[in-house]
């Protein structure tokens, strides 16, 4: 059986959002696409899709960036699962996480949405929360800044210095989940 993994990077469409913290999931997908030498193309499921193998003879990856805003990501994700005839256990969602310190990657399967509206919409559209999440830590907003404002701001200059490493770590996590499973990936990323 060579079912692919559907890897969805959450974010908002348009150049004005591309450097926002909320778009870190799509930044990770750009890193993965470069690694597997795949290019994003418009797909009939209202997403940009790139396909390839994680490494020669490795697991197939379908990388998808919904063309919708973050809070309504569920429709395209459900359509992609249907198009590729995949169950949610073959879904990896890469997204920003306020409750994890910046420059940290955490992995989990299942659970609730934790206040993340993109995850909430995917759970509603797919009918389950039983999928894998690669949570990319962006930290909490400074002072009294509302979380909604913080996630829609670009990474700061200090963060941008280490952002490429964070994107590489998250891409490594996706590839390890696809190749070796969640438990093996958690051993690596939760003990470092």
Image (cartoon, rainbow, N blue to C red):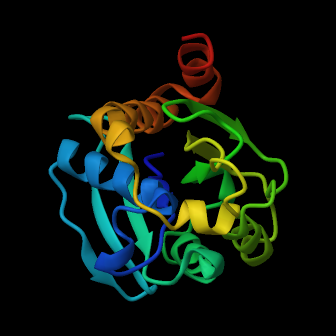
Residue 48 is situated, as x and y percent measured from the top left of the image, at 34, 75
Q: Quadrant of the C terminus?
A: top right
Residue 58 is situated, as x and y percent measured from the top left of the image, at 32, 35
In the image, 93 versus 138, the foreground residue is 138
Residue 161 is situated, as x and y percent measured from the top left of the image, at 28, 35
State which quadrant residue 159 falls in: top left
Instruction: Give left or right: position of 128 versus 180.
Output: right
Q: Is residue 92 visible?
A: no
Instruction: Give left or right: position of 91 versus 57.
Output: right
> What residue appears at the point 29 percent right and 77 percent down from the top-left corner?
15
Instruction: Give left or right: position of 96 versus 17.
Output: right
Residue found at the very far top of the displayed protein: 191
Q: Is residue 179 visible?
A: yes
State which quadrant residue 124 falls in: bottom right
Residue found at the very far front of the displayed protein: 143
Instruction: Give left or right: position of 99 versus 134.
Output: right
Q: Is residue 46 above or below residue 12?
A: below
> What residue appears at the point 30 percent right and 46 percent down from the top-left corner?
32
> What residue appears at the point 35 percent right and 54 percent down from the top-left corner?
27
């Amino acid at each position: 059986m060579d079912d692919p993994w559907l890897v969805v990077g959450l974010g908002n469409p348009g150049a004005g959002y591309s450097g926002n913290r909320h778009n870190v999931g799509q930044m990770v997908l750009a890193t993965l696409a470069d690694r597997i030498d795949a290019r994003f193309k418009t797909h009939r499921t209202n997403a940009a899709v790139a396909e390839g193998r994680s490494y020669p003879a490795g697991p197939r990856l379908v990388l998808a960036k919904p063309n919708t805003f973050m809070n309504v990501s569920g429709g395209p994700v459900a359509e992609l699962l249907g198009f590729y005839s995949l169950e949610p256990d073959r879904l990896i969602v890469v997204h920003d996480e306020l409750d994890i310190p910046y420059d940290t990657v955490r992995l989990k399967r299942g659970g609730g949405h934790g206040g993340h509206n993109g995850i909430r919409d995917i759970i509603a559209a797919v009918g389950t929360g039983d999928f894998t999440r690669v949570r990319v830590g962006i930290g909490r907003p400074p002072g009294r800044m509302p979380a909604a404002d913080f996630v829609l701001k670009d990474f700061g200059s200090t963060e941008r210095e280490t952002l490429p490493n964070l994107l590489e770590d998250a891409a490594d996590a996706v590839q390890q989940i696809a190749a070796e499973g969640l438990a093996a990936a958690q051993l690596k990323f939760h003990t470092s």
